Image (tube, grey):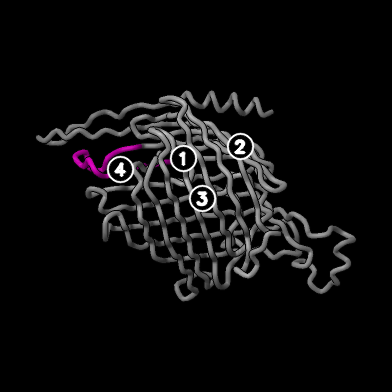
Amino acid sequence: MKYFYVILFLCSLSTFAQDSIDEQKGKAKAEKKVKTVIIPTITYNNSFGTMFGAMGSGFYKLNPKDTISPISKSMIIGTYSTNKTWMVIIPNTFYFNEDKQRAKFVVGTGSVNFQTYVDWGDFLEFLPDDIFNVIQPEGEFVGYNNSFQFAFAEFVTEVYKKLYVGGHLLYSHNLTDFDTALKKDEENNLFGFGLASVYDTRDNQMRPLTGMNAKLSTMHFLTGLGSTSNYSNINMEYNKYYPMQETNTMLLRGYAQIAIGDVPFSGQNVVGRDDLRGYSNGKFRADQVYDVQTEYRHALNNKWGYVAFAGLATAINTVSDISLDNTLPAMGAGIRYLAIPKANINIGFDAAVGRDDWGVYFRIGEAFTR
């Protein structure tokens, strides 16, 4: 089976790309060029099964005369899995005014069939602890379906030498149906607002070799504004790139996602997803997730390269819960292919293992470049 996925991955390297028609506008006859790409994708893990999809992208300069701003991008990503999970996401990232302002706009919808790990004590709090050993020592996985729709907008402006500050808004609707009557279904309407800040000195947005990218953001949901729950989300990221030779780099990363207040099930954080590779079964879920990682990126030639990575994570509800017992290691490796040279965009294929879990990942761009 693993050879089947490798073959499919290599086939996907035959990307369909085309330059847009150069447009002339008025007497200035300004040239506007858009690089468009369509890439088929495939991944696999033991929760979703095989996931098939495609990504269409457009890369462009909002102002062709602006030589300082990074390339803006608009994408549409569609995915369908063998467990009948599907989603469509449309992310847009804009850089303009010589990189003095940045903006994001993302909309999406989907239906996710996943699972969560539930302690027996959460099901049957009135029963004595000894009875749990008769059934299973800890608990069991419970399946659920989460249907969602969301819209997200963010704007930041440079306030001092690559330090950007601004705000963002989020609206989402989530309906979560559990496969057991012992756990109540949830429906949430959430309207959030918060601070967005980033310090970004990377030499390239899509394939950085040197510099730093640090983020601090908050999101607050209030019932007074129409949200179902009152809670806040705090996100912190720190990525530092250490160049090694001309085309290689070492990344050090720290990450924290902290939910505080009346946190709904859909507002909790899960180890894995698009952060720590090697965890895909949803077992480690809590209000707070922390992790540290390192990744080495090596270019073999102008087109091909490989990465090797490792990290530690924990999922807890309060900081006092941190211990060696709930520390989660992961490690893995992957290959890279420079699919879009003009935009410095790699596509890749990663495999990783964690504690009693694993995952296979198809990547567009390097990890942690969003």
Q: Main secondary structure of the magenta part?
A: loop
Find residue 241 and report its horizontal and vertical position in percent.
Answer: 42, 45
For label 3, the residue is 109
> Which is more toward the observer, 369 or 191?
369
User: Amino acid under label 2?
Assistant: Ala
For label 1, the residue is 366
For label 4, the residue is 70
Which residue sits at x=40%, y=37%?
Answer: 57
Q: Earlier in the sequence, mark 4 or mark 1?
A: 4
Residue 72 within the magenta-colored segment of the rendering:
yes
For label 2, the residue is 351
Select label 3 or label 4 by which is in front.
Answer: 4
Q: Earlier in the sequence, mark 3 or mark 4?
A: 4
Asked if marks 3 and 1 touch (Cβ < 8 Å), the reply is no
Is residue 314 depicted above or below 364 in this figure? below
Q: Earlier in the sequence, mark 3 or mark 1?
A: 3
Which residue sits at x=50%, y=69%?
Answer: 232
Q: Residues within 10 Å of mark 2 (few under 14, many from 20)?
A: many
Q: Earlier in the sequence, mark 2 or mark 1?
A: 2
Select label 3 or label 1 by which is in front.
Answer: 1
